[in-house]
Every structure is written in C-alpha cells, then in structure tokens.
Image (cartoon, helix red, strand yellow):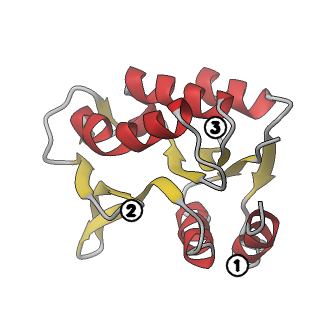
Amino acid sequence: MPTRILLEGRPGVGKTTAIRRLAALLHGRDIVGFTTEEIRQGDARVGFALETAAGRRAVLAHVGFPGPPKVGRYGVDLGVMDRLALPALMAASADPVPGQLVLIDELGRMELASASFREAVRSVFEAGVDVVATVHAHSDPFTDALKRRPDTELIAVTRANRHSLPDDLAARLEYR
C-alpha cells in the first residue's frame, strides 16, 4: 500500500524546509512534484515561486500580478500550475512508477485556486504512488477531505519537530 502523508502546519513553522530537506535526504529516489518559496525584496515578502523537482522554476504569485485570482494581496498565475506542477502529477497518477515519490508543497489557497490542480491531486492520492504533501492548518473542504482519508497520515509540523521530521520520514520512505 502506498504511503500518503500530509504535513500540516501554520505559516512559517517550517513545512517547506522540512519537505525540501526530505527531498535532499532521498536523493536516490525518483522524486516528482514541486516546492514553493517566498520571494522577498528586503524585509518584505512580495510573492511566491514554484520550483519543480526537475528544477523548472516560475513565479506563482506576486503583489504585482493583477489576478484574478487574488489570494490576499497576491495575484496568482494559474498558468504556472498548469505548465509546471500538473505534468509530473498527472504522469505519476496515470502511470505510477515503482519507487516514485510525489512531493507537493503546498496544498494552500494559491495552489488550490486551480481546479485542474485539485483534480491532479485527487488523482495522485488515488494512484499507487507514495505522496508527501504540505497542507495549511486552516479548514478547507478540499484539504479537509484529504485529511480524513483513512489511508493518509496527518503529521503536525511544529517548531519542536521540524528539524527531526525530515530524517524520520526519510527513514520510513527510503526503502519503499
């Protein structure tokens, strides 16, 4: 049975850092998916970039983007999800590769604004592939349904466990 893990936490607790460290620890595995990171100008956060496991990168959201959609003060470029995130997720769900790991950072409001992304995530969670995804702590119908799945483990990321969590997860996932 595939491993499905949701890493849940509040903004800034270290979810992205944990999933990136996990990817580095599992460098021998076939990893697909993406991570996100803040774009900063000085002390101010002005947007978010998306980077695939294959190294493709683009700006997902920015205060200078007009939207729609808008999430807070950020306009979101849903085309980035379609061009960068979806191809690997759809391939992983359509033709699961033994030993492949799908990493998704994150199942947040910006990413979930894309209906095609939500469908790709549903497909990945139904496929026979290991999945580790980060998820926001607030309630949302889509992520709440994933959190309730009996085949999915929900792990809270906290300041106390954020440094040890990647090593613990890598040990569990390394030999699958």
Q: Whole-percent x and y of residue 91?
A: 45, 37
Cα distance between the residues tagged 1 and 3: 23 Å
Name the residue located 41 percent from the left edge and 37 percent from the top edge: 111
For mark 1, give the secondary structure. loop
Real-space CA distance between mark 3 and mark 2, rounded to the nearest whole angstrom: 19 Å
Q: Earlier in the sequence, mark 1 or mark 3?
A: 3
In the image, what residue type sits under mark 3?
His
Left or right of residue 125: residue 147: right
From the viewer's perspective, is the residue at label 3 or at label 2 nearer? 2
Relative vertical location of residue 101 with respect to residue 80 in this rendering, above or below: below
Count of numbered tags: 3
Which residue lies at the image location 70% right of the left edge and 72% below the top edge?
166
Query: What distance separates the C-alpha of mark 1 from that of mark 2?
Result: 18 Å
User: Could you tell which of marks 3 and 2 lies nearer the N-terminus?
Assistant: 2
* The one of 141 and 27 positioned closer to us in this rendering: 27
Label 1 crowd (10 A; few <14 / some 14-19 / many >=20): some
Q: Nearer the viewer, residue 138 or 112?
A: 112
* Residue depicted at 67% across the width and 27% down the height: 126
Image quadrant occupied by the N terminus: top right
Q: Which residue is mark 2?
A: 37
Q: Position of residue 14 (x, y in %)?
A: 59, 67
Tell whether label 2 touches label 1 (CB within 8 Å).
Answer: no
Q: Which mark is residue 98?
A: none
Q: Earlier in the sequence, mark 1 or mark 2?
A: 2
Relative to residue 167, is residue 60 drawn left or right?
A: left
Residue drawn at (77%, 55%), measured in percent from left and top? 156
Left or right: 112, with 141 as reference point: left
Mark nearer the viewer, 1 or 3: 1
Residue pointed to by mark 3 = 138
**Residue that label 1 marks:** 163
**Image check: 161 left or right of 82?**
right
Residue 81 x, y percent position in the rendering: 32, 38
